[in-house]
Image (cartoon, rainbow, N blue to C red):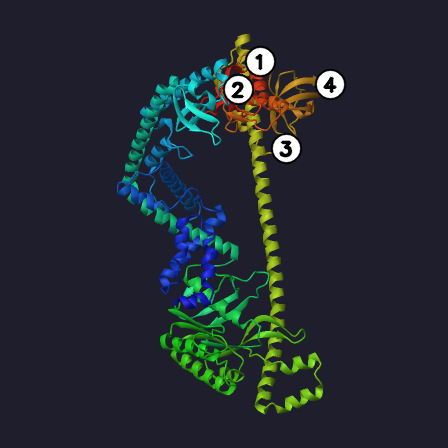
Amino acid sequence: MDSKILHTLDYAKIVYTLSQHAATALGKAEVEALHPSSVLDDVKHALQVTDEAYKADRLKGNAPFGGVADVKPSLMRSKIGGTLNPAELLEIAETVRGGRRVKRHVLQLHDDDPIPMLAAMAEQLTEHKPLEDAIFQCIDDQAEVMDSASAELANIRRELRSGESRVREKLESLIRSSSVQKMLQDAIITIRNDRYVIPVKQEYRSNFGGIIHDQSGSGATLFIEPEAVVAMNNRLRELRLAEEREIEKILQKLTALTAEYADDLTVDLDLLGKLDFAFAKARLAHVMSASMPRMNDRGYLKLRRGRHPLIPRDQVVPIDVELGNQYTAIIVTGPNTGGKTVSLKTIGLLSLMAMSGLFVPAEEGSQLCVFDALYADIGDEQSIEQNLSTFSSHMTNIIRILNTMTPKSLVLLDELGAGTDPAEGSALAIAILEHMHKLGCRIVATTHYSELKAYAYDRKGVINASMEFDIATLSPTYRLLVGVPGRSNAFAIAERLGLQRGIIEHARGEVSEEDVRVETMIASLEENRIGAEHERQTAEALRKQLEEQQARHEAELRRFEEQREKLLAKAQEEARAVMLRAKREAEDIIADLRKLAQEEGAAVKDHKLTEARRRLDEATPEARKSAAKPKTAKPQQIGNGDEVMVYSLGQRGHVVELSGSDALVQLGILKMKVALSDLELVKNAEKSKTHQPKLAASLKRTRDENVRSELDLRGSNLEEAMLEVDRFLDESFLAGFGQVYIIHGNGTGVLRSGISDFLRRHKHVKSYRLGKYGEGGAGVTVAELK
């Protein structure tokens, strides 16, 4: 497709809008490569994929593409032997995990509602859990290599932390010395060139042995590494180098593992890009309220309330167009600013969108054609540099179209023949249209020339159309009327504006008789159209009324069926309850008979008991007509602790307390006052005591994932801080933390001292200390909990 045509029809703006709905860089790359296709099967396949994604998006929302990134460069580096850094490895692991989530999301949707094309793509995605787990076990969310990455790294870092602690303790004992404090600019420990140093006043340089690593801007302070810690700092340096070497070994190992999966992951990335592209098309369809058009390659086009996608929906006027069946060319006439050019662009742009596998903003049932090419001559493209007039520019484009178009092309011509003498321009326009029409391509052309109205009227396969104009308001309505040529409306407009009637009558006399007949014919057609439109609207209103009545009838029928099913289910449940109660009473009677036989030595035979039970089963009612309480021959003796059935609620509970004709009943976690007449004794408390299991209560502390192990108090006053620390310690203790960090900063030291005094007295605190290097130093207090 010619890029100039795509630009003229604003196709690039649609592509840009589509790219905003892609969730990944992979999807955006697929969008940028989008291009209309002239192969019908390819277009149908692309539309089917869009339709499946549209259905999936409607049912379950956006697919989970979070974490998926374009890691192809990293995969390529792993294959050629380069070492990936932690951030690159973390990105690969997150992409593998994201791909697995997308696969499961799509396949689950496919199980619920078939989407075979998307499912086929998702099935091809590979799940490399070993690679994902290996990376996440070594690298944390901040792209840092964790201690658990290897035993050697854990040992090195443990020794490193221990060494740093010893150095700090040595320096802290040094700066606490009264003889040394007077020589220090500040009683603090700092770091220069990865070595622990203290700030010494310039005048005391000779009193200190060791190494000078830095000095302040004013030169008044020297940062000195005392001799006492030089060897310890050297050891720390050795450990840091060992740490770097071990981290490099871990990264190389992970990179080698990545290289083993690189080819599979490259294929996965392509599939993920295609899936993201499909869901982006679905989201664009939702935003535009678009539908899937039916496609053909017969040159047939039918838009039902088609809208230009770049015009806001509350402003755009839909158009209805049919082309390629009874007629292959449409000649659109009408005033300027009436919407002719927008109608041309709507037809062209919606055709390009459909050929790209996109839904189009039109009603269901619209049909579009796969053309081998689209050609358009729209707008004033005169070029000062090329010294071309408007007419010359138009003719240059039209000549190029005439030389390349085929019978399967769609040609859009705006203001055909404009820019020259009207007589010659109209004659040339008719000749060009006739040539294109004989070739068999599909044509939509706009013009001001009245001669083309007569051409369209007389020529088979060509039809007039116009943009509707409201004489009452002297303004266009932007509606495309196919089959009705446009009227000039010049005399009517002039008369409405107040031009003298004599002048208007004189002007009418200058118009040829043939032109008058044409205008009269057009006026008659317009009148008939308005009448037909009114009849159509009336019929449409009646049809909607009938549909609404039918919908109400169907809804009432559904409600009746649902109510009938509910009543039937309720009746069955009541019958089942009656049967269960009758069987339970029979069991109680048989148990009492057995007990009586044992106590009194009566010769009650088992077969007689079995016979009695059979007769009771046969007497069990089949159904129950009401949920009323069955009447008993004698009142029930209900006491405290008895298990009872509450008829009005249909639930069991235990009697807590009797009060006259009422009882307080425990129903689960609720206690209710219920009348004794609403209760049925299920089990006596005395009988159930022997079978009552012993209950034991236990409290299990679990860690709340929302509780953090650190509290930042910087900026708080002492009173507020104490309240926050107390709450924080309680929550941390209940969450099972062994150690917590309280961040108070250095400042004046008031907050640090207050927190220390509070921790010393707190019931949950086992011990506390200031932070070590890497923990925040003196700006952090670390508390160990009991």
Q: Residue at x 59, y 91 (%)?
A: 513
Marks 2 and 1, Cα distance to the nearest angstrom? 15 Å
Q: Earlier in the sequence, mark 4 or mark 3?
A: 3
What amino acid does circle 2 point to?
Phe
Pointer 2 and pointer 4: residues touching (CB < 8 Å)?
A: no
Residue 660: mark in rendering:
4
Q: Earlier in the sequence, mark 2 or mark 4?
A: 4
Residue 756 image point, x, y percent: 56, 17
Pointer 1 and pointer 3: residues touching (CB < 8 Å)?
A: no
Marks 4 and 3, Cα distance to the nearest angstrom? 26 Å
Left or right of 775? Residue 257 is left
Looking at the rendered structure, the secondary structure element under dot 1 is helix
Residue 634 image point, x, y percent: 67, 20
Left or right of 506? Residue 582 is left
Q: Earlier in the sequence, mark 3 or mark 2?
A: 3
Q: Earlier in the sequence, mark 1 or mark 3?
A: 3
Pointer 4 and pointer 3: residues touching (CB < 8 Å)?
A: no
10 Å neighbourhood of mark 4: few (<14), some, or many (≥20)?
few
Marks 3 and 2, Cα distance to the nearest angstrom? 54 Å
Q: Earlier in the sequence, mark 2 or mark 1?
A: 2
Q: Quadrant of the N terminus?
A: bottom left
Outermost residue to the right: 660
Marks 1 and 3, Cα distance to the nearest angstrom? 65 Å
Query: Which residue carries the number 2 mark?
Result: 733
